[in-house]
Structure formats: C-alpha cells, structure tokens
Image (cartoon, rainbow, N blue to C red):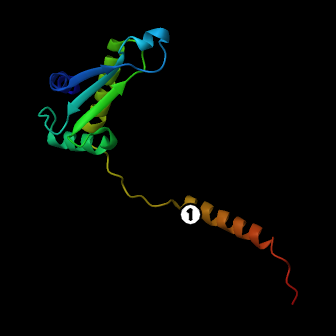
Amino acid sequence: MIDEWLRHIELEAAWSFARSGGPGGQNVNKVSSKALLRWNVLRSTVLPAEVKDRLLQRMGRRLTSEGDLLISSQRYRDQPRNMEDCRAKLAQWLHEAAHPPVPRRATRPTRASKQRKEASKRRRAERKSSRRPVREE
C-alpha cells in the first residue's frame, strides 16, 4: 500500500538539488549532492483523506503555506543516495500516518502504587519535620 503511494507521489513530486555542506572535500564545492523533494500534499489525490489529515498534522513545520511538503537530505556525498534517503523519510512518515493512533485507555493506580506513594510522602514529611528547630513547651 505504502509502496504504491510512493510510486504515485514520485509522479507528483518535484526534485531539486543544491550544494550541500558536510563531507566531500573539494568535491563539495562542485557537485550538487543535496536532494530536496517538494510534494504538494493538499493537491495530492494519492492518499485517503484520514491519512492525509494525520500527515498534515505531523508535518507542521515542514509544510509551506501552499501545502508543499519539503524533505531534504545531505547525509551522503552523492545525489542518488540522498534521493533514496528522502524517499525513505517520506515512506517512514507515510507509514506512521497510515496507522491511526491507539487511543489511551484510562487506568487507575493500583493499591500497591498508592501505598508506595503514601509511604514516600510520609518519609519526606518526616525528613522535613526533623529539620525544624525543637519547640519548647
């Protein structure tokens, strides 16, 4: 399912390349190895609505005002590996967005945890009360 989405996204997305920092020696000044993937999530018809909503929620700061998702990679020295890294990041985010979050089930503290908490409070109170000066009556 996610592989199919990725194939369709490849057709909708636009790649651009820039010179990257990091390792590469003198080669870094000559080769544009940084990969930047730009994909408009809002206009995309690939994803189901609920997956798209979860993806938009998660990718807040990576989205432009037009709805473009920007993914960049400059981890490697060569362009194809950085492109593959961008694809891997997108696949990971799609995988996370494809599965709805499991709702938290409300639980109550166990009897033992309540007793431990009370004992801890008693010890702390005893320690603090022992610091006070002794009052003469």
Q: Residue furthest left?
A: 45
- Residue 77 in sight: no
Residue at 75 percent across and 69 percent down: it is 128
- Kindly identify the amino acid type of the residue bearing the numbered disc 1: Lys
Q: Which residue is mark 1?
A: 114
Q: Tell me the quarter of the picture where residue 52 sits.
A: top left
List x then y, in percent, for residue 76. Answer: 42, 16
**Image quarter in which the N terminus is found:** top left
Mark 1 Cα shell of 10 Å, populated few (<14), some (14-19), many (≥20): few
List x then y, in percent, for residue 16. Answer: 27, 22
List x then y, in percent, for residue 25. Answer: 50, 11
Residue at 49 percent across and 60 percent down: it is 109
Tell me if residue 99 comes above or below residue 3 in the rendering: below
Q: Is residue 106 left or right of residue 114?
A: left
- Residue 21 in sight: yes
List x then y, in percent, for residue 122. Answer: 69, 68
Question: 75 or 33, which is in the foreground?
Answer: 33
How many discs appear?
Answer: 1
**Image quarter in which the C terminus is found:** bottom right
